[in-house]
Each structure stands twice: as structure tokens, then as C-alpha cells.
Amino acid sequence: MTSPASRPIRILMDVDTGVDDAFALLFAALHDGVDLRGVTCVDGNVDVDQVVANTLQVLNTAGAASVPVARGAERPLLNESMYARDYHGQDGLGDLGLGPAPTGPVSLHAVDFLQKTLSESLRPLVIVALAPLTNLALLLRMYPRIESQIERIVLMGGSIGSGNATPLAEFNVWHDPESAAIVMNADTPKTMYGLDVFYDVTVTAEQGIALAAMEHPAAKLGGLLISHQVRAMAAREEPELPVTLGDYGALAALLDPDGATIESATVSVVTTSGPARGQTVVDLGADMPAGVGDEGAAVDVVTKVDGHRYSTMWLEAFGLSGTAHA
């Protein structure tokens, strides 16, 4: 893990760009602690073509149109696609009516783009995976030697406790359990940022309004997405709560691990049919070598975060004080 004071972390991001992926992408494009080498897209919150369009729109808005974007898997390995448009909007970005980006994706498939980028890098890169893990599973199966070029996989997925797609399963893992199992069982060091901390890094409606009033297009987009989430919660008749920055927290834990409690664990993914399909079974405190064991694979699991610290870091990337309008 690297602290904010260190040199920028070279990362690749794998996304299914909905609202909270956008929060993470905006931050990655703006923060000087991140060296974003590319973004791969996968079927998840919305279909993969919409994910590509959303990703290009977000990066262009953040002034990062030069970051290469690659289109990946169109569906999970075995499951049928199940989208989350009720949460993210029909277009995945809050139905804000954003125009198309002036750039398009690279010609390489996401898996080949990952292989090429990793192989050509002078040192291993970190992959921040904020989506179903189909692209990464295919990468590890098609190019198994590439693991030596992956410094760590930081993934938003899974849960120690309950789920959000089912009572037991978190959406990203549930969407493609077989791929999640392949990635969890890889020898590469892994950090799991799951539902247990997903909702702990938040911003307020007032902070969203303040961002939307700023001149920078990235700040405006961040603010509009926050306001969409506020409206969506009201439409679902949910109590008025702060808006979670969700996926962004996984990136925050990578940049600033001192703001998180991270415990060694063994993790296995339920891939059988039935009500537990997609569940991550987490045995905390287990001390086992990297790789697969009888009870699961070695994974570093984020069990607690300093939500205010991480939300302040996100807001400050746009030039907004973390205490403003709190």
C-alpha cells in the first residue's frame, strides 16, 4: 500500500460506470496521487456499450480524454446480465442528458488491452476493480503469466455480512460469481473493499449543490450526480441520508491506507445455485499463504474506514473544503 505522500500510484481501473464508479473516475482523473494508465469497461450496472459511453463522458468532463478506454465483456461467464438502472438511472449516470464524448474506445478488447499495458509497464501496476470481475477473470485465464505484472488487485465487491443484490450477496460478486472466484483465488495480492464499508464514505446534498455551482466541469458533474442520488432516494421513499461515494472508497483505501482498518482473511465465493449464490464467505484473522486453501483464498479485507477523512479527500480533489456545507 502507498500513502498520499508517496509518488503517484500507477493504476488501471476496471469499471461498469454508474454513479459511484463516476465518483471514483473523477477523483482518479483529478488527484495528483493517481497515475491513471487506462480504464476497462465491463457489463454490470448497465450494458457494456453504455458503460463505455459513460466512462468516456466522465473522463472527458474531467479533462482526461487522453486516458485510453477499452470495451470488455458483454455478459458474465455464466449468469444472464442483471442491471441496476433503478439505482443509477436508465443511462447509468443519473439520466443527466450528457452529450457524447468526442473520443472513442481503443480498438483492443479490454482483456488484450490489460495484457498489453501490463506487459509493457516497467513495473507492476495496481488494478482497481469496481465492477463485476469478468474482464479480470478472462485476463487471468487467457494470460496466466501476467500475474507477475500486477502489483495488487483492489476490488469493490463482496461482504462480510449481508448483501444488496440478495440477502447474502453483494451486486458485483453476485453478477458473476465464477469470475469473482477466479480472481479471489489468484496468487496476486488482493484487497477487498466490501459492503461493510461501502456506505461509510458520504457527502451531503448541500455539498453536492456547492460542487454543482463550481466552474470546473468535473465538479459540476460530481455535484449533479450527488443531486441525482438525493432525488432517487426521495423517489424510493427512503429516509433522507447522506449520499455514499461508494466505489470511490476502494480507491481511497489504496491511496490512504492509514484511514482504513485492513485485516487478513480467507475468502471464498459461493458459486453453486441457490440462495447463497454470490456470497463471499469471509474468515477474518486467518493467516495463510497467498493462493487457494481448503477454506478459501488469502485476501486483505477492509473492515472499517474513516469516512470523513475519505470524503474530505474526495471533495478537496475538486477544490472544495471537506467541511463546507457539511
Image (spheres, rainbow, N blue to C red):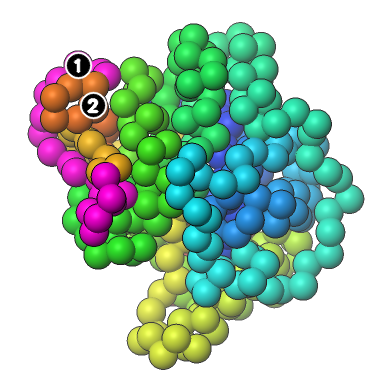
Q: Are marks 2 and 1 in contact (CB under 8 Å)?
A: yes
Left or right of 139 in this view: 179 = left
According to the picture, the residue beneath numbered tag 2 turns out to be 298
Whichever of labels 2 and 1 marks the residue nearer the N terminus, that label is: 1
Most common secondary structure along the magenta stretch: loop
Give the residues in magenta. 272-291
* Percent position of residue 236, x then y: 44, 86
Q: What mark, if any, has residue 289 been given in the picture?
A: 1
Left or right of 230 in this view: 93 = right
Residue visible at 57% across and 63% down?
A: 19
Q: Nearer the viewer, residue 226 or 141?
A: 141
- Residue 228 visible, this angle: yes
Left or right of 116 in this view: 1 = left
Q: Nearer the viewer, residue 213 or 134?
A: 134
Q: In the displayed structure, would residue 134 be above or below residue 92? A: above
**Circle 1 Cα neighbour tier, 10 Å, few/some/many (<14 / 14–19 / ≥20):** few
Residue visible at 75% across and 43% down?
A: 64
